[in-house]
Image (cartoon, rainbow, N blue to C red):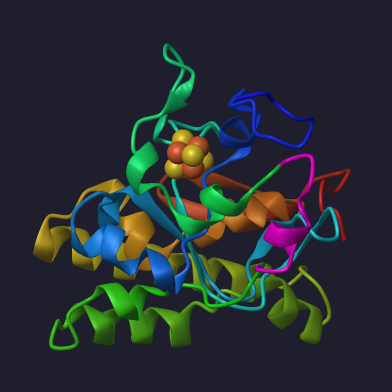
């Protein structure tokens, strides 16, 4: 078949920029085992994330479940560098099916719509749902907005309290259920201290005590 300019050349560039967020249409991919819970990372509502429609880092308005990157990088977990291809191609998420990098309009129209959430992938009787709910109430994902309401990120005591509460809930579940770090990222998203690092704060662990301070030059985008 003759390739037109707008057809996908399967160069892998999109896959290297990050895994997709799952839509409700993708639920069977998880239920049928093509994508596991521990291969997803939760971006909680209000967390800062990249919005391809605006090209900016912004608070996400809805919870997102994204396929994790490889290691600390962005490349989608399912991208095979050797073959330069997707290892779940026949069962890839909706976003990957509709994405055309030279004609992104179709994809941009779907952003933040019909997104899959954690609760839809967890048995309603599972007690972990109550822990997730407690975590949401205790350690909000919209940290930047909450701190802005309180006059910025200078409240070191509050930050420390939130980070400790976040780590305590994660530790409690890890100890009781023996979950992996990857599963923790699905259940609770990124740890708060990681978010704070992206908000121009840095933290140090002094003999087990967390201490925050603002970096001299903030790396926060907005
Ligand atoms: S699921 Fe497959 S097609 Fe989609 S970003 Fe990952 S490697 Fe690429």
Residue displayed at 21% across by 66% down: 173
Q: Does the magenta portion include 88?
A: no
Residue displayed at 70% across by 82% down: 146
Label total for image: 0
Instruction: Please determine whether, in this image, residue 16 is positioned above or below residue 64.
Output: above
Q: Quadrant of the N terminus?
A: top right
Q: Does the magenta portion include 106?
A: yes
Residue displayed at 63% across by 67% down: 47
Specify whether 175 is left or right of 44. left
Q: Quadrant of the C terminus?
A: bottom right
Instruction: Please determine whether, in this image, residue 111 is positioned above or below residue 89.
Output: below
The magenta span reads: 101-110
Farthest-out residue, top = 82
Q: Which one is in front, 204 or 45?
A: 45
Residue 202 in the image: x percent, y percent? 67, 47
Tell me the chief SS of the magenta region. loop
Residue 103 in the image: x percent, y percent? 79, 47
Specify whether 49 is left or right of 77. right
Q: Which one is in front, 189 or 66?
A: 66
| Residue 204 can be seen in this image | yes
């Amino acid at each position: 078949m003759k390739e037109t300019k707008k057809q996908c050349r399967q160069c892998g560039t999109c896959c290297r920029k990050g895994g997709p967020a799952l839509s409700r249409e993708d639920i069977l991919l998880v239920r049928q085992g093509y994508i596991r819970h521990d291969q997803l990372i939760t971006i909680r509502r209000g967390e800062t994330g990249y919005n391809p429609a605006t090209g900016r880092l912004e608070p996400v308005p809805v919870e997102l479940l994204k396929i994790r990157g490889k290691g600390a990088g962005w490349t989608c977990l399912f991208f095979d560098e050797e073959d330069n291809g997707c290892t779940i191609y026949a069962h890839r998420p909706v976003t990957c099916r509709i994405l055309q990098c030279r004609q992104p309009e179709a994809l941009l129209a779907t952003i933040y719509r019909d997104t899959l959430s954690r609760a839809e992938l967890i048995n309603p009787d599972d007690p972990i749902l109550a822990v997730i709910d407690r975590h949401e109430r205790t350690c909000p994902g919209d940290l930047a907005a909450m701190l802005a309401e309180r006059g910025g990120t200078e409240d070191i005591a509050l930050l420390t309290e939130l980070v400790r509460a976040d780590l305590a809930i994660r530790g409690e579940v890890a100890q009781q259920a023996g979950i992996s770090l990857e599963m923790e990222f699905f259940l609770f998203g990124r740890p708060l201290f990681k978010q704070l690092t992206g908000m121009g704060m840095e933290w140090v662990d002094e003999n087990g005590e967390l201490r925050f301070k603002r970096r001299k030059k903030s790396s926060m985008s907005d």
